[in-house]
Image (cartoon, coloured by chain):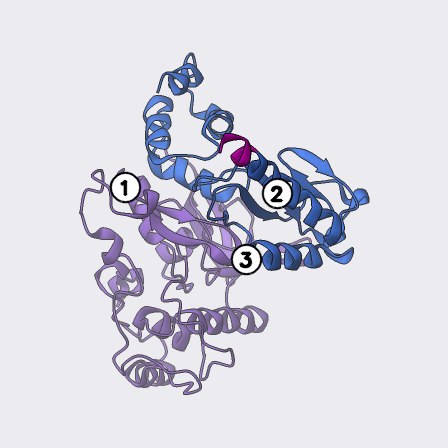
Amino acid sequence: MTALNSILKGRQSQPHLLIEVLHDVQDLYGYLPEEAMSAVAQELGVPLMEVYRVACFYKAFSLKPRGKHVFTVCTGTACHVRGAKLLIDQVKGQLNIEPGETTEDGLVTIENVNCVGACALGPVVIQNGAYCHHMTPGKLRKAIDKSRGKKKKEERAHA
Amino acid sequence: MQQYVTLKIDDARVQAIKGASVLDAAMASGICIPHLCYVPVLKDSGACRLCIVEVVNDGRTKITASCTLNAEDGMVIRSNTERIRKLRKNIAELLVAQAPNSRAVQDIAVRCGVKEVRYPFRNDNCIQCGRCVRYCTEYSKANALGFVGRGKNRHVEFALGFRRDFCKKCGFCTEYCPMSVTPCGGSMKSGEGRLCGNCESQTATADKFTGVCVRCELGRGFGCVRQTYV
């Protein structure tokens, strides 16, 4: 809770800072826990309903815990035309999860967003904040394998 | 001192308090513009779009919701033209298709001239008029209800998904909800295209004798202003 307090420090009773604070909370936990949202609502003087509404509205905020590696597939118009659907199908087949879900081992989360503003580079996939341009299903498969494979090696090293 | 503005609604000169909406002005003078999401004590949101009117400006007409339109001096409003009636009927039809199990929506649809519904039923049981949400935030100041999600996933929900301690349990969200009164003919099924028969007969009488109010029973939260003039 101390980390949360440091985020809220100096921002009390300033409702206009809501989104900024939520971004920081999201960076801290990887998602928005209920207790954190209640604390934010109380400290900023915003109704909890408003916090929840904002958190649900923006795709940047997640209400569920996310995996260690987050792959965000852009499904905007330009990316869609260039085959973003194939990327989604690839993910579904490989990880057996729907967009917005996390694998059971808590390693990989797949999300889809409507546009990331890099249409000239489409299809775009954001891997943990890094933009990967001109994605193909093959490239995406390798990237996901790599992110999961690393963990396997670590496990082997520990064993 | 209160300032007044003079505007023309349906060729009638109407005086309104400065800052009042066109819908307020019309109803205060006994001109009934159909409305659904409008609640006198709450802020107007223009959600249902039933109260659309034509605003004549330099010979050109613009269609807009009258509940969110401020009355200004010299305004010319037409609330009952052929074009408006057609659009309003279509809007009412879409509302019925969205939520067929509501007496209030059916009553208003019948009054707007809907005979059958051409759209597939969605059975959402919510037309997102925001009456409950606005009452909760503005009047009872509980902030327990709100709109969550966006686009077609927008819906009314409690904060974090369940009823919180700060809900005052006043029950006015259901009182004001147009879905709380079921139609007298029972709920509507897809493809039946039947509207509440009782209301239809009432409209027929109102058509015969001009000036007779339909007196649709829209639930307690729906006190029609027109009834006071009958």
Mark 3–mark 2 contact, CB under 8 Å? Answer: no
Q: State which chain disc 2 sits on.
A: A
The residue shown at (61%, 36%) is: A150
Q: For the residue carrying disc 2, how many other residues have a C-alpha within 10 Å: few (<14), some (14-19), or many (20+)?
A: many
How far apart are the alpha carbons under marks 1 and 3? 48 Å
Mark 3 vs mark 2: give the one in front: 3
On the rendered structure, is A131 left or right of B171?
right
Give the magenta-colored segment's residue range.
A154-159
Query: Is residue A157 magenta-colored?
Result: yes
Mark 2 vs mark 1: give the one in front: 2
Q: Quadrant of residue B17?
A: top left
Q: Which chain is blue?
A: A
The residue shown at (55%, 70%) is: B87
The residue shown at (25%, 62%) is: B228
Is residue A60 or residue B98 the one in the foreground?
A: A60
Tag 2 residue: A71
The residue shown at (51%, 58%) is: B152
Numbered label attached to residue B139: 1
Tag 3 residue: A96
Q: Quadrant of residue B192?
A: bottom left
Q: Colour of chain B?
A: purple
Q: State which chain disc 1 sits on.
A: B
Dot 2: what SS? Answer: strand
Q: Are marks 3 and 2 on the same chain?
A: yes
Instruction: Locate the N terminus of chain B by quadrant.
Output: top left
Give the main secondary structure, helix, strand or loop, of the magenta stretch.
Answer: helix
